Amino acid sequence: MLVGLLALASLTGAVTTPSAPQRYRIEVKAQTEVDATASGQGKFSSELSLVGFITVTMSDTTGGQLAHIVVDSVVIPAGIEMPPQMGDPAAAKGIFFHGYIVDGKVKGGLKPNQPNQLVAMLAGGVENLFPGLRTTAKVGDTWSDTVKTDATSEGMTQQSVTMINWTATAGANGTGRISPT
């Protein structure tokens, strides 16, 4: 995927120096409910949770930006017991995503550079960092966006809904800035 993005960058224009890295904490909670009453076993439910710490670096290119997203660490909250098949959280460190971002929205999806069950759980939250931006916003405008992500990866289906409140403010040197509030 990196080769494809670099080729895309060379076709669309020169890539400038990356912006300062931004760090994020993403919390993911997955609930599973199984209704086995038809087979006489009742209903079962389980909950998995994790916290991922990532670093995002953006580079401008003609028509959009290139995003480089690195998993710094994954932590399992106290009291949560992960099934062994989910793997060791330490193995997630260093896994990265690349994406082409146009108007604040991912084009073509984000996929990790290597398979990892815990990073697959984190992927929906990572993609929600790029819900798309309102290009006609003026300083003082506020609005809300709801982002729904449905993803299937490594035999696991994820659905997430995120609501983000935005505010357009004045930036440095008279430029505008749009940020979550």
Image (cartoon, rainbow, N blue to C red):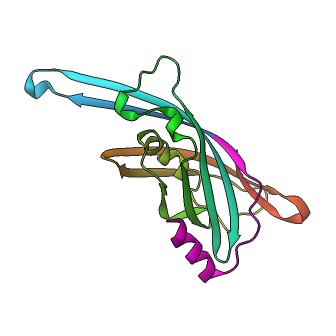
Is 75 situated left or right of 48 in this image? Answer: right
Mark yes or no: residue 2 visible: yes
Above or below for 107 versus 131: below
Above or below for 13 versus 180: below
Instruction: Determine the residue positioned at 20% across, 29% down.
Output: 35
Above or below for 78 versus 127: above
Q: Position of residue 37 (x, y in %)?
A: 13, 25
The residue furthest top is 79
The residue furthest left is 39
Q: Position of residue 140 (x, y in %)?
A: 78, 55
Above or below for 134 versus 82: below
Is 59 situated left or right of 111 in this image? Answer: right
Q: As rendered, which of 110 and 33 lies closer to the eye? A: 110
Q: Is residue 21 magenta?
A: yes
**Residue 9 picture quarter:** bottom right
Instruction: Determine the residue positioned at 14% across, 20% down.
Output: 41
Q: Is residue 51 magenta?
A: no
The residue furthest right is 173
Instruction: Determine the residue positioned at 70% across, 65% down.
Output: 59
Q: Position of residue 174 (x, y in %)?
A: 88, 65
Mark yes or no: residue 133 visible: no
Q: Position of residue 160 (x, y in %)?
A: 44, 44
Image quadrant where one finds the C terminus: top right
- Please give the range of residues in magenta: 1-24
Q: As rendered, which of 85 and 135 lies closer to the eye? A: 85
